[in-house]
Amino acid sequence: MSNTVDYIVVGAGSAGCVLANRLSENGKYSVCLFEAGPRDRNPWIHIPIGYGKTMFNETLNWGFYTDPDDNMLGRRIYWPRGRTLGGCSSINGLIYIRGQRQDYDHWGALGNPGWNWEQCLPYFRKLESNDLGAGPTRGAQGPLSATSIKTPHPLVEALIDAGGELGLERRSDFNEGDNEGIGYYQLTTRAGKRCSTAVAYLDPARGRSNLRIETDAQVTGLVMEGRRARGVTYRKGGQERALRAAREVIVSAGAVQSPQLLQLSGIGPGALLSEHGIGVVKDLPGVGANLQDHLQIRLIYEVSRPITTNDQLRTLWGKAGMGLQWLLFRSGPLAIGINQGAAFYRALPDSPTADTQLHFGTLSADMAGGAVHDFSGCTYSMCQLRPESRGSIRIQSADPLQAPAIHSNYLDTERDRRSAVAGVKYARRLAAAAPLSSLMKREFRPGDEVRSDDEILHFCREHGATIFHPVGTARMGPATDRDAVVDARLRVHGIEGLRVVDASVMPTIVSGNTNVPTVMVAERASDFILEDARIA
């Protein structure tokens, strides 16, 4: 096996699988894709509702925890991150959302040419096979499936009608640039099974002789020669090994581990690196800074009729029926996942576009992925779409196997705190609107006794958690921006032969789930890399 390839891709997640496919597609270049975790053979990965089983699986999940967050009553918050082929796309909630037109126009306005909505739209269309059919904003021939929920659920239908009472219009497509409204989510499923990026992009490419896939192989550092990346060191089977890249190393390890790998390799805040005895190759203070995430606040209601997924999961016959429905027809609750109902609304009246997202689940549990309650229940999970609060990712030592320190810093600004409270109040208005109100027996959490703004904010601090969307820790921006890490073609500033391609390059978080935008970023980056190879 050669010890040199043209391109090394670190991380076989939502972005890495895309890159491995596209860079090896023409047969001209050799590519090696590294994944610290195993192959995606666990059956729960491929059953859409199975992320309740992978949420705490130590083999498939990094299982990070944040540092104690003073804004969250000193709590350490669990951050699951994918550790298998497909990365987080193999363990996430399957929600197919792009965000809003303004998100990408803002990226362009920050000094990133080529990243506005109209310029990103062709790549969104390229990546998807949407069952709503091709159109000006939709694609129908791409690798990643966007599948509509076909079977109505009485709770979701009541939610949609209640939203109409509050002025939200029903919509079937939330991905046209303006996502305000209410309806059913589309999901990254295909024929009743999860369509991760490993399924969509890696499976069709596995037989290529120029693509090497290394699983159970954790990259421990970048091989640097001066200010050029020449390869990686990695650990596999208890041995330290190395691989060289003739052209480029592409870091796609995600918003937690991409900045960690850069810092371990001497690229990052100089003082931090020196503190841990790491030689400074390039002092880039923005590496690990600018961390953003969506904070979810979950309201739980007891439902007056036994029509929830809780009811089906509570009995052996119910579980057997769900399993049989999926095995025979690839349909039913197992084929959909947890969150079916979608709403994007303005919780704060001065917001120019929808500022809050609702994930409505037809089940309830004390935490996402936990055991369901022993009553008929549903969940209203809200998150502020464009938080102002910023956190950080920082190595704690020079040991590549030690998890980095995650400073989430949720609810750090007044607007973020007001938005959290307003989002809860709006969800309560939805639950109290007809016809949904007739199905809501009682508010289980936080409960009717929590009424004032201060009480609601305390509830948010006490129970808020990640909705699994960290971004921004290697942000894109011009060289004149001291805190930018990569340029508009995702090349690391001041370093040759090195790019970062994943959610960490997003300068600001998008107004929705981050998986599909990450796939789009990787599609764009693939073109950048191949274009630059032709010029070189």
Image (tube, helix red, strand yellow):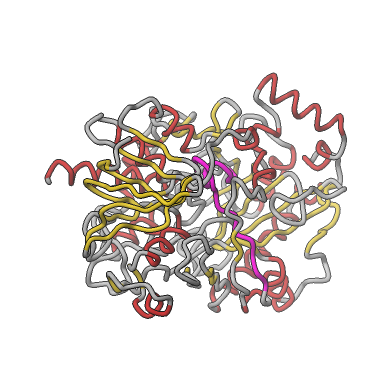
Q: Work out which residue is located at the far left of the displayed protein and give it.
A: 535
Q: Work out which residue is located at the far front of the displayed protein and give it.
A: 239
Image quadrant in which you'd find residue 23: top left
Between residue 90 and residue 111, name the one nearer to us. Answer: 90
Q: Is residue 76 magenta?
A: yes
Between residue 410 and residue 155, name the one nearer to us. Answer: 410
Residue 459 drawn at (x, y percent): 72, 70
Give the vertical position of 414 relative to 312 (above or below): below
Identify the residue at horizontal 32%, vertical 47% (top origin).
243
Identify the residue at horizontal 69%, vertical 53% (top origin).
368
Give the vertical position of 6 relative to 422 (above or below): above
Image quadrant in which you'd find residue 263: bottom left
Q: In the rendered image, which quarter contains the N terminus?
A: top left
Q: Is residue 114 magenta?
A: no
| Most frequent secondary structure within the magenta stretch | loop
Give the vertical position of 298 relative to 370 (above or below): below
Residue 85 drawn at (x, y percent): 50, 40
Residue 284 horizontal side relative to residue 404, left or right: left
Image quadrant in which you'd find residue 150: top right
Q: Work out which residue is located at the far top of the displayed protein and give it.
A: 328
The stretch of residues the image draws in magenta is 75-93
